[in-house]
Amino acid sequence: MTWYVLAEGYVAAEGYVAAEGDVVAQDEVVARLRAAGCVFAEEEAAVLRDGDPAPELLAELVARRVAGLPLEHVVGWARFAGRRVLVDPGVFVPRMRTEVLVARAAAYVRTGSVIVDLCCGSGALGAVLAAGADGPVELYAADVDPAAVSCARRNVEPLGGTVYQGDLYGALPLTLRGRVDVLVANVPYVPTAEIALLPAEARLYEAPVALDGGADGLDVARRIVAGAGSWLAPGGQVFMECGEHQAAAAATALRAAGLNPSLHHDDDLDVTVVAGTRTH
Ligand SMILES: C[S@@+](CC[C@H](N)C(=O)[O-])C[C@H]1O[C@@H](n2cnc3c(N)ncnc32)[C@H](O)[C@@H]1O
């Protein structure tokens, strides 16, 4: 599908034509969203109205949201860890639960740190880490999906970072080997058989490669772990997100790769962050 820009920050599917009389009065927006089943209709209405779009544009945005597109794909951005991250159509929308991973990784970022964001999607994790650092850092991000890479470039390059396209570590310049202080990787970790159970917003509007983690969900995570020892600097750490039921297997893989594992579960957001440190 081709998309075109309607106005700064907004995109619409090619061929979309707002119907006559499709202009939504401001006070109707919440009602339309609620009728379409949006649980947080007021909050979503505020996001759709952000930037004070013209009535015709607002009508188009509301229509697309009511049709089921993820809010972030409708407006072209997501709020993540206090930052506005650009999100292009088809690119994984950064989730609030991933802020837990970012907060844990941020505690290890220092001025001059080498940060790598693998499976970067929109580049949200690396962008937040670099923007929140006390001083300059080196930021590198990579993804296999060209749409994600082009989106990540818009978020990461303004911060002085570089985005590569390719398969995991294969995308990175060899000069980074043994130099990475903080490696974040929010990999796809949904077991293949559970993809069908995901909400439609994910199944229909995010790329399968962003979701499918193989039979037990840990295929990509295991490959990240296997390579981490040779890419991390001594004392460097890798951070990944997974489900609670996957944490023990992820920790076992980290130990087998010679890394010192630690686990953190966040009850509120129901997410587990596994970390591994290169100790020698
Ligand atoms: C769950 S999404 C996470 C995106 C981003 N890190 C975030 O949290 O918003 C997983 C990402 O991994 C990428 N990916 C999957 N397999 C990959 C591989 N073998 N090499 C590089 N990227 C990969 C997908 O394209 C997708 O953008």
Image (cartoon, rainbow, N blue to C red):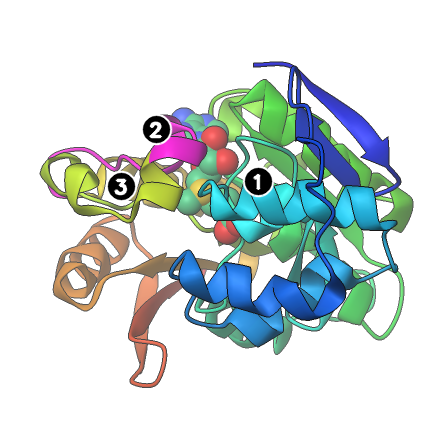
Q: Which residue is mark 2?
A: 208
Tell me how far mark 2 sits from mark 1, CA to CA: 22 Å
Residue 64 disc label: 1
User: Is the CB atom of the residue marked by disc 2 within 8 angstroms of ligand 1's nearest atom?
Assistant: no
Judge whether 231 appears above or below 133 on screen: above
Q: Please, what is the three-letter code of the amino acid marked with disc 2? A: Pro
**Which one is earlier in the sequence, the residue at label 2 or at label 1?**
1
Q: Which residue is mark 3?
A: 222
Picture quarter with the N terminus: top right
Q: Residues within 10 Å of mark 2 (few under 14, many from 20)?
A: some
Q: Of residues 277 and 41, which is closer to you in this image?
A: 41
Q: Does residue 242 show up magenta in the picture?
A: no
Q: Position of residue 103 (x, y in %)?
A: 56, 75
Label 2–label 3 contact, CB within 8 A: no
Tell me how far mark 1 sits from mark 3, CA to CA: 38 Å
Q: Residues within 10 Å of mark 1 (few under 14, many from 20)?
A: many
Judge whether 39 appears above or below 9 on screen: below
Q: Please, what is the three-letter code of the amino acid marked with disc 1? A: Arg
- What's the residue at 85%, 52% (across, down)? 53
Q: Is residue 175 visible?
A: no
- Is 133 left, or right, of 227 in this rendering? right
Q: Please, what is the three-letter code of the amino acid marked with disc 3? A: Arg
Per the image, label 3 sits on a secondary structure element best described as helix
Q: Which residues are magenta?
A: 204-216
Foreground: disc 2 or disc 1: 1
- Is 27 left, or right, of 195 in this rendering? right
